[in-house]
Image: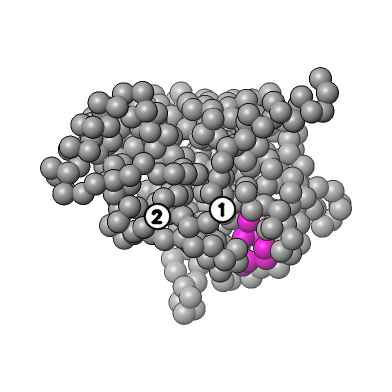
């Protein structure tokens, strides 16, 4: 195939990502387990890239975990998300930036439902108005926040202070990118690169100097899966998926895992502890486990931010081996201190320390 043909086909896998003026909606899991990530995203957008990002304190959970657990009916979650759109309309915004991959999948699912079943849209408008007196518009642009960081990856590269290079060897760091299932597997056109060639994270890693690893189970689930995990009897299935994925990547000696889903990040981080406790297995070099970073945390490191300000100490798998490879100076005694210098309780049983 000639170059022009390839270019035309690849254009079908690109999604439109707004340039500015975002209504930001947070993630329950991300702000609970990785609060530094969402805070850094706002700092990145407003103070480093100079973008207009607004968040409304009246925003609530999307109820996605309840929906995927068959607790929250579809009519209810459609009305909850319609309320989010109403808050956006009242705030004067038309572009929505979604922090959570589960929420992002639900927004796209509901918008597709309303597109093909307009009677459901009409019923949702009625439910929302009767319950709250609010009205809403369909967003002009729906982007996951990883889409937005991907869009500005070259601008970030121009400001980079810490490229993804192993300072000891001079070689690019080996990156495993993991895309959340709800990002593009359900509705491929909603994701950058679609379901077949999602390059939202690999594009960032390569732009900042890293080498992306291709391995057999690259598109395998992290092991989360709401029904696997929420039903206690099924958790062995959840762990076995994670074992399969990490066993597949281990021979390629990744330096770190990069995710765009807070649930994937939590499970790939904490299940490494669980697996080590069960059978002593580790998947990194020299008996270490593999650090699992959010794309916001990686962006912050590349831009030279203090790793503890980004919240890396709140992972189960600690990042010191990776920080040394990057040549980042850090003070381990500051890991668990508040901004005013008070020592917080030290967590136990962390990995890589």
Whether residue 282 is visible to the viewer of this picture, yes or no, is no
Q: Quadrant of residue 212?
A: top right
Residue 187 belongs to the span the image colors magenta: no
Q: Nearer the viewer, residue 103 or 121?
A: 121
Label 2: which secondary element: loop
Q: Position of residue 40 (x, y in %)?
A: 53, 61
**Quadrant location of the C terminus in the rendered image:** bottom right
Query: Considering only vertical position in the picture, is 350 above or below 53?
Result: above
Q: For mark 1, what is the residue?
A: 19
Q: Position of residue 334 (x, y in %)?
A: 56, 71
Crowd around label 2: few <14 · some 14–19 · many ≥20 (10 Å): some
Q: Position of residue 307 (x, y in %)?
A: 60, 63
Q: For mark 2, what is the residue?
A: 93
Furthest-left residue in this view: 130
Residue at x-position 47% and y-position 32%: 182
Residue at x-position 69% and y-position 26%: 9
Task: Give, as a single range, the part of the protein colored magenta.
Answer: 298-308
């Amino acid at each position: 195939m000639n170059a022009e043909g390839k270019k035309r086909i690849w254009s079908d896998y690109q999604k439109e990502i707004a340039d500015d003026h975002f209504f930001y909606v947070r993630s329950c899991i991300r702000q609970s387990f990785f609060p530094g990530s969402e805070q850094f995203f706002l700092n990145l957008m407003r103070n480093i890239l100079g973008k207009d990002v607004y968040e409304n304190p009246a925003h609530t959970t999307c109820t996605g975990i309840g929906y995927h657990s068959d607790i929250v009916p579809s009519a209810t979650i459609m009305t909850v998300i319609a309320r989010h759109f109403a808050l956006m309309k009242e705030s004067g915004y038309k572009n929505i930036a979604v922090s959570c991959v589960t929420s992002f999948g639900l927004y796209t699912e509901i918008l597709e439902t309303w597109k093909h079943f307009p009677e459901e849209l009409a019923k949702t408008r009625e439910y929302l108005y009767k319950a709250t007196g609010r009205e809403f518009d369909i967003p002009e642009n729906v982007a996951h926040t990883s889409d937005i960081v991907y869009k500005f990856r070259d601008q970030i590269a121009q400001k980079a202070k810490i490229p993804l290079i192993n300072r000891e060897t001079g070689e690019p760091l080996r990156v495993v990118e993991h895309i959340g299932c709800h990002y593009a597997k359900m509705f491929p056109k909603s994701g950058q690169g679609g379901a077949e060639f999602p390059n939202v994270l690999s594009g960032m890693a390569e732009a900042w100097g890293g080498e992306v690893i291709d391995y057999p189970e690259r598109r395998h689930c992290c092991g989360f899966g709401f029904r696997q995990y929420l039903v206690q009897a099924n958790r062995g299935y959840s762990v076995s998926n994670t074992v399969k994925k990490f066993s597949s990547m281990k021979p390629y000696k990744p330096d770190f895992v990069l995710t765009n889903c807070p649930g994937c990040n939590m499970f790939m981080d904490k299940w490494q502890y669980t697996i080590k406790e069960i059978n002593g297995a580790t998947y990194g070099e020299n008996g270490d486990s593999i650090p699992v970073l959010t794309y916001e945390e990686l962006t912050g490191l590349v831009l030279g931010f203090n790793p503890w300000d980004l919240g890396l100490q709140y992972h189960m798998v600690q990042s010191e081996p990776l920080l040394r490879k990057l040549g980042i100076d850090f003070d381990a005694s500051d890991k668990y201190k508040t901004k005013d210098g008070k020592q917080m309780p030290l967590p136990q049983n962390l990995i890589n320390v």
